[in-house]
Amino acid sequence: MTVLIILLIIIVLFILIGLVKINVDFNFSEDKQFDCFLRILFFKIRLLPSDKKKNKKKKPEMKNVNSKINDKDDKNNSLKKEKKEKKSFTDVLQNVKIFVEPLPKFLRRLAKGIKIKRLSVVWCISTDDACETALKYARCCGYFYNVFRLINSICEVKVDKIRIFPDFINENSYCVVFLRLQISIGRLLIGTLGYLMAIIIKYLNKNKKERLK
């Protein structure tokens, strides 16, 4: 009975963890300042820029006293490297395939668990010349909407406001962006476990084939 109770508690915990969703807020202001916040339930954590300034300590310079000993060590290390067996190109490709082949399924599952809950873009385009402003405006609109279509085909996007406009009077361009990204921990865990299982199965199959040879 105790074992069943423990298993039930573990299952309930996994279900509760799976229901939790993480929100990541990205904010780019008119002053070209970038902020990033992580929201989990009622907690809000500032990711970028960090408030704490790390003081880099200068490492003391090491004096090369025993230069001959260092030269000998370098020679020994080079000999050891030469003695190591070099893997063939096919072996490297096989090892890479083990990790690369399950990636598309993992990315699809991950994309299903990611949503853009709020997207707000205000982009003013301006230059010294009116003709250049018009051309730059056309290019920027083309780039932006192509990227937007690509993102919208991968994951769900809820648009709050998108406004891209040229300014022929002033000469200062600016861009204000707010993006709220929602990540489902449940889908992320399922996708990660599936990816790891696929790698393990492929690795075991590869070892079986090598043994049969």
Image (spheres, grey):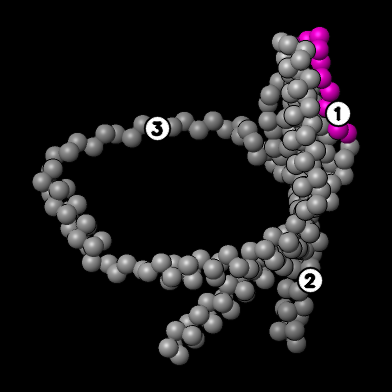
Q: Quadrant of residue 158?
A: top right
Q: Give the number of marks.
A: 3
Instruction: Classify residue 203 as left or right of residue 64.
Output: right
Amino acid at the residue labelled 3 = Lys
Above or below: residue 206 compared with residue 103: below
Does the rendering let one see residue 180? no
Image quarter in which the C terminus is found: bottom left
Residue for badge 3: 57
Q: Residues within 10 Å of mark 1 (few under 14, many from 20)?
A: few
- Asked whether 86 falls inside the magenta stretch, the response is no
Q: Residue furthest left?
A: 68
Q: Secondary structure at mark 2?
A: helix
Disc number for residue 12:
2
Please give the name of the residue rendered at 79% of the width and 27% of the height, measured from the top-left corner: 138
Quarter of the view holding residue 110: bottom right
Tell whether label 2 touches label 1 (CB within 8 Å): no
Q: Position of residue 17 (x, y in %)?
A: 75, 62
From what the image shows, is residue 158 above or below residue 132? Answer: below
Read off the magenta span.
161-172
Q: Is residue 1 visible?
A: yes
What label does residue 163 carry, if any?
A: 1
Q: State if disc 3 and disc 1 touch (CB < 8 Å).
A: no
- Where's the N terminus, which quadrant? bottom right
Residue 15 coordinates in the image, percent (x, y): 79, 68
Pair 1/3: label in front:
1
> What's under tag 1, amino acid-wise?
Arg
Which residue is at a point 47% across and 30% down the rendered structure image? Answer: 55
Q: Which mark is residue 6?
A: none
Secondary element type, mark 1: strand
- Please state which of residues 39 and 188 is positioned toward the viewer in this rendering: 188
Q: CA distance from mark 2 to mark 3?
A: 47 Å
